[in-house]
Amino acid sequence: VNVLTALAAGSISGASTICYNTTPAAFSSTASASGSAGTYQYQWQSSVDNVTFTDISGATNVDYTSGALTQTTYFRRVVTTDVGCGPSYTASLKVTVYDDLVAATIGSDQNICYNTAPATISQSVAATGGDGTWTYQWESSDNGTSWSSITGATTTSYSPSALKTTKYYRMKSIGGSGCGTVTSNAVMILVYNDLYAGLVGNDHSVCPQSPANTLNGTTSPTGGDNTYTYQ
């Protein structure tokens, strides 16, 4: 009776931390299978809890390249032989997947008078996901469609200067580790038209101690929020 040496699965490498829905680097063999006899056969498996593993269809080579991942996943390689020995398992490796990026929420719309400064626009709900590190960039627009970066506006709040036309603002949150950028809701700062006082009556002359003609508005005021009081 020929007793074969024990089958050893070898070892694998490639543990990593990646962004959501991206592909990890290939997993490679760092020590070959050994022992037993015959031809080695390979099957890669995956698991989300490092307990229950499932065969990966078509993954039967010494090395393996995973597809994009959306949750933390463990991988291992199973080795058998064509003479019926095995299975033998490598230690598992872990690919940690950061959570998907979720954009921040900022302030709310404002209505302001012509050539006045709106209240500071601030982040009300922080962006989440990725590795938890962020940088920021505020943008402005005249129409809510075409956007331009605001130089120096790189914190979680922004204070616009006095405005004469309606503007839109939004904040981009840029995730660390190259995980991408997400964009907040847009806030509209509605700027009322400049006030125009209108015209009243016409110049006229009166005799001493005589009443002047009643002065009536001949052209109505415009601008602002279109509600007026008079004095």
Image (tube, rainbow, N blue to C red):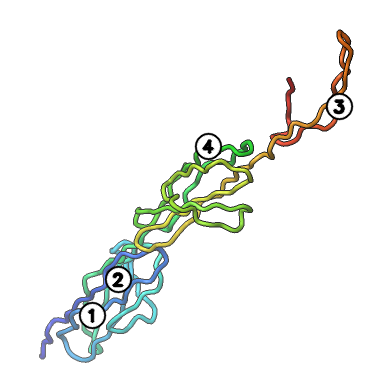
Closer to the chain start, of discs 2 and 3, is 2
For residue 29, the mark is: 1
Of marks 1 and 3, the one in the foreground? 3
Spatial CA distance of label 4 from label 2 is 52 Å
Of marks 2 and 3, the one in the foreground? 3
Closer to the chain start, of discs 4 and 2, is 2
Closer to the chain start, of discs 1 and 3, is 1
The residue that disc 3 covers is: 202
How crowded pointer 3 is (Cα within 10 Å; few <14, some 14-19, many 20+) is rated as few
Q: Are marks 1 and 4 in contact (CB under 8 Å)?
A: no
The image shows residue 105 at horizontal and vertical percentages of 49, 46
The residue that disc 2 covers is: 75
Closer to the chain start, of discs 1 and 4, is 1
Q: Amino acid at mark 3?
A: Asn
The image shows residue 223 at horizontal and vertical percentages of 72, 36
The residue that disc 4 covers is: 119
Please tell me which residue lies in front, 116 or 149: 116
Q: Amino acid at mark 2?
A: Phe
The image shows residue 81 at horizontal and vertical percentages of 23, 86
How crowded pointer 4 is (Cα within 10 Å; few <14, some 14-19, many 20+) is rated as some
